[in-house]
Amino acid sequence: MFTPRARRVKILATLGPASASLDMIRALTVAGADAFRINMSHGTPEARGALIANIRALESEIGRPLTILADLQGPKLRIGSFAGNKVTIERGGTFVLDLDATPGDVTRVELPHKELFAALSPGARLLVDDGKVVLRCTEVVPGRITCVVVTGGTLSNNKGVNVPDVVVPLPALTVKDRADLAFALDHNVDWVALSFVQRPEDVAEARALIGGKAALLAKIEKPAALDRLAEILELADAVMVARGDLGVELPPEQVPPAQKRIVAMARAMGKPVVVATQMLESMIVSPSPTRAEVSDVATAIYDGADAVMLSAESAAGAWPVEAVTMMDAIARTTEADPQYYARVHFTETATAHTTADAMSAAAAAIVKTTGAKAMACFTISGSTARRAARERAGVPILCLTPARATARRMGLVWGVHAVVTRDVAGFEEMVDKSKRMALRTQLAAGGDLLVLIAGVPFSTPGTTNVVHVVRLTGKELEGH
């Protein structure tokens, strides 16, 4: 049985050309990766299918559930092409965006997104190529947007466009996204990430299409999403602080407080939260990170993030295993800080007025008072484990479930070690199995206290109503 991690925060590693083989995925898992992101913007369906097959083969090999997140591309806006492949435009000049597919020049280029022409008004900004070129709209007429160049520079073919000042009337899921989503669900991925969420309706649309076949993570990378964050979190199963596009559309100095706000609200609402983008960016080319990057990762962990993510560092970098190893080391060292749990609890997570939430809060209080070594819960849907994680009790959470899909989804949930096991028929069987699994996973030893959370009657989702404390003798595995 795979030994649980010596940390609570999870590591989400993006797979790509540098990490596609079974051997590399195994090495990343050994180094500390708990979950794997497949970027649906890149690669062929055959390549993505091979990645999923390799992860599932490794899962069977090591006997531990592994988590797969399929990240949909979303409605990315792009300019057209240029006659000479690129042009340089000067600050203070005029530049036009239109619907003419003719290759562009130094005065104009195609913007093949009709929806934008109705949404934009004078004063709105257009950020091209991650904000390297900034345009401000001065006039909009049918089929033509006239702009003044605020920040000049070189424009080349098909560069991305961000429009931070308006809610763009684009569908949450493009034709490509819908095809990629169908592929992901057919291959039984565990999480689906929805990109460029602007409003709760985007999440509702994706949730309806997913139909419960995977959990849904909303990526917060648009200022419009920040305005309706609570509503989006209410509908999503988890959220990601996607600092790439968020850092383009917001002034850089506004990204840290936005990150703090997203993490705090997600934790307060009991939804897993992932912090992503450029966490160890220099490790794409260097075997060691900068001190600032190490501090950045540690800050997210101190704030209580459920998971931290590697992007190009593990997907296309020269040091993918070293990047995961470094992130694991940062996490373990941060969590070993005597002030770690005090800092994690700077964010208040008021208990909701439900029996299940009251049981989870009580279990966390018992852990703190008694010095119990671990919590254990039986769950079918995973809601009991997520509630326990919300309390950040400071001990590992042993999640016992008969549902493999539930166990796999726990790879993005703080502190949870999931084990797939047969369901239990009665209270005493639950107690005995919890003791044995705590010993097998080495989360507790003889003489330790274990706090159990469960629902009676068993096999009924949403009935968490029991907290029970047991002491292990260390002999529970005899005869088993």
Image: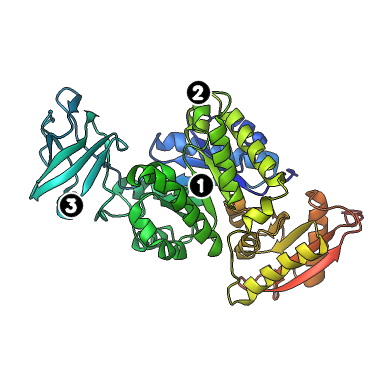
Q: Which residue is drawn at 82% across and 64% down?
A: 370
- Relative to the observer, which residue lies in front, 209 or 313? 313
Q: How crowded is mark 3: few (under 14 residues within 10 Å), some or many (20 or more)?
A: many
Which residue sits at x=54%, y=40%? 296
Which badge, 2 or 3, is on the more N-terminal residue? Answer: 3
Position of residue 359 measured from the top left corner of the image (x, y, whole percent): 68, 72
Q: In which quadrant of the rendered image does the C terminus lie?
A: bottom right
* Percent of width and height locating residue 238: 50, 56
Horizontal side of residue 219 vs 447, given as left or right = left
Label at residue 249: none
Kindly give the residue lying farthest to the left in the view shown: 141
Amino acid marked by disc 3: Leu
Q: Is residue 331 among the parts visible in the rendering? A: yes
Res 423 visible: no
Q: Which of marks 3 and 1 is nearer the N terminus?
A: 3
Q: Is mark 1 on a helix, strand or loop?
A: strand
Q: Does residue 153 lie above or below 298 as drawn? A: above
Amino acid type at image mark 2: Val
The Cα–Cα distance between marks 2 and 1, rounded to whole angstroms, is 21 Å
Q: Quadrant of the N terminus?
A: top right
Q: Name the residue under label 2.
A: 285
Q: Which of marks 2 and 1 is nearer the N terminus?
A: 1
Q: What residue type is labelled 1?
A: Val
SS of the residue under disc 3: loop
Q: Residue at x 81, y 60 (%)?
A: 371
- Give the residue number, with chain letter if any, for mark 1: 275
Number of dots carrying numbers: 3
Checking the image for residue 120, the label placed there is 3
**Neighbour tally class for label 1: few under 14, some 14-19, many 20 plus, Cα within 10 Å:** many
